[in-house]
Structure formats: C-alpha cells, structure tokens
C-alpha cells in the first residue's frame, strides 16, 4: 500500500472524494494568497501583527480544515484515535486549566505526529497534495517550513534591533525572532519554543508559533548534559538530525507533553514557566 498522500491524490483525480471532502473549503486559499505579497512588502517591526505570522495562522486554518474534512476517511483513523486520546489526557487550553497550550498541541498534531505505514504527518500529506495540484508557491513554502519545524531549546540573548535574539543551545545558531505573545524575558533564560522562518525576502528573522515555555532553575549546561545522556553531543557532526528526531519524533509520542505537564511551575498571560529535566527524577514538581 502506498503513502496516504498518494492514495488521496488518486481519489482526488478520480473524483471519489467529492462527497467526503468539500473541495470548495479550500478555495479561500486563493483569496488570501493574492494579498500576501503586498502585506509582506509593508512589514514593520512595530506592527501589531507580523505579516508572516498571519500567513502561518492562515495555513494552520487550512490544515485544520483539511484534517477535519479528512476525518471520514479510513486512512486517518489512527490519527483521530490518537488526537482524541491526547485531547482527553492533556486537555489543551492554557494555565491554570492546562499548561499544554492550544498552539503547542495544534502544531504538534499538524507537524510532528506521524502515522500510517510510511510515517506521514498531516502537513506532509497536505504538502504532497499541494505540489500535485500546484498550490501557490508562497503557500507551499510556508507548509514546507512547518514540516521542517520542531520544538527546540534556546537561550535568550536579549533584544537586538527591536527583535528577540535567541541561540540554539546545541547548535550555537543565533536567530532574531518575533514573539507574538510580546514576552521578551531576560538574557540567560532557557526557552522551549517552535520557530519558523519569516516569508519575505527583505529581512531575515524567525517567527515564534507558540506561547514561550520558560525553563527556570536549569541552565544551558543542564540541557547539554541531558542531550549527552541521550546520545546527542554538542557540535558533533550530524547532531542536528539527532536533535530534530529527538524533539520532533520521539518514540514516546507523549514524551514532551508529559514533560510540560510534569514541569509546570507558574504562568503569566504571555509565557509559561517550567522547571526540571525530563530524565532526572524528582526535578519536576508534578511528576508521579
């Protein structure tokens, strides 16, 4: 049996999805695509809404519509069983109800949760459809960026050029980013976030997709040691692939969800505080 995306393409081509998926739901993609270039040209750091972030939210909406429409297909049974299981276990919202935020949860299931024989994600399936049916290039670029994204640990370096500067703890790569929650924090803080590239050609910065998780009490060395215990060493050749797999495709699908739940400490309206290291028993306030 081929990939899920290949099966869907065949069904689309044979018009066998018309009664299951309302294809008109995707027509509004074209409606906002025509406005993207002009919006990106007008980007300003002090604007209330970053244009690239707006596009990613639109893409999220499209992916969510697609996943809802696909819920009636047998190919997605595993996906929806897990989605329901995780939803009941973690009740995504915002503290104090749950430290698993809706943004964190949604991006995980759209971009990170693999299912089926060929270990596809909802975003890779949709990307394959978009390539086949020639969706707009900018839209597909955004989907590609989401496919490649993962939660990572960064150290806050402070504000630079009106943007937040972070450095990846393991790779040492420095990035400037827009934090849509408006929390800037303090230099030295450890942040647990998902970043994606901006979509215009004028500037080079990242867009933060989730409300930042701030890890207190543990420092950069604590996390470097954590990775080392998991077979990932700083500056080792090929470690970026190992880090990505560990963060994005952990064998235990609930691993990072449980970490957030167990390590929750406190929150503000624009950030959530965690404490502890996943594999150090007793370091997290809510672990069983």
Image: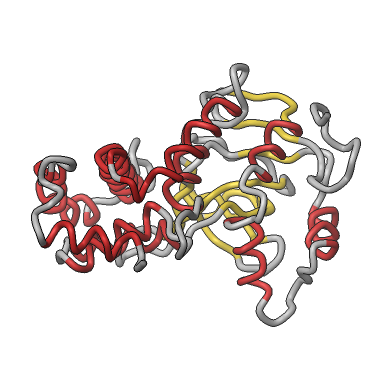
Q: Residue at x 83, y 48 (%)?
A: 279
Image position of 61 (left or right of 206): left
Instruction: Using the rendered view, name the quadrant where residue 248 is placed.
Output: bottom right
Q: Position of residue 94 (x, y in %)?
A: 55, 24
View extreme (top): residue: 96
Look at 79% across and 68% down and name the residue there: 231
Dividing the picture into quarters, in which one does residue 25 lie? top left
Query: In front here: 196 or 69?
Result: 69
Q: Residue drawn at (85%, 60%), measured in percent from left and top?
A: 225
> Which color scheme does this rendered protein use?
secondary structure
Residue found at the very far bottom of the displayed protein: 237
Q: Position of residue 46 (x, y in %)?
A: 37, 42
Asked whether 50 or 117 is in front, the reply is 117
Image height of 22 relative to 232, above or below: above
Is 8 situated left or right of 164 in this image?
left
Can residue 54 be seen?
no
């Amino acid at each position: 049996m081929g990939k899920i995306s290949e099966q869907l393409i065949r069904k689309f081509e044979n018009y066998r999805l018309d009664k299951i998926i309302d294809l008109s739901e995707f027509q509004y993609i074209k409606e906002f695509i025509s406005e993207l270039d002009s919006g990106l040209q007008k980007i300003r750091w002090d604007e209330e809404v970053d244009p690239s972030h707006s596009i990613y939210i639109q893409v999220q909406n499209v992916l969510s519509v697609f996943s809802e429409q696909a819920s009636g297909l047998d190919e997605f049974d595993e996906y929806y069983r897990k989605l329901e299981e995780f939803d009941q276990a973690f009740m995504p919202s915002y503290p104090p109800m749950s430290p698993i935020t809706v943004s964190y949860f949604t991006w995980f299931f759209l971009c990170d949760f693999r299912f089926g024989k060929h270990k596809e994600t909802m975003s890779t399936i949709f990307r394959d459809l978009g390539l086949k049916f020639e969706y707009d290039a900018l839209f597909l670029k955004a989907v590609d960026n989401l496919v490649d994204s993962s939660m990572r640990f960064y150290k806050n370096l402070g504000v630079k050029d009106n943007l937040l500067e972070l450095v990846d703890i393991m790779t040492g790569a420095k990035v400037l980013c827009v934090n849509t929650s408006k929390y800037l924090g303090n230099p030295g803080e450890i942040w647990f976030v998902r970043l994606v590239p901006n979509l215009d050609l004028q500037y080079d910065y990242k867009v933060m997709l989730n409300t930042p998780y701030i890890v207190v009490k543990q420092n950069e060395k604590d996390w470097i040691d954590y990775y080392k215990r998991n077979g990932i060493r700083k500056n080792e050749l090929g470690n970026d692939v190992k880090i990505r797999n560990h963060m994005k495709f952990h064998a235990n699908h609930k691993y990072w969800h449980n970490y957030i739940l167990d390590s929750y400490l406190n929150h503000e309206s624009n950030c959530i505080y965690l404490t502890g290291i996943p594999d150090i028993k007793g370091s997290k306030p809510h672990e069983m």
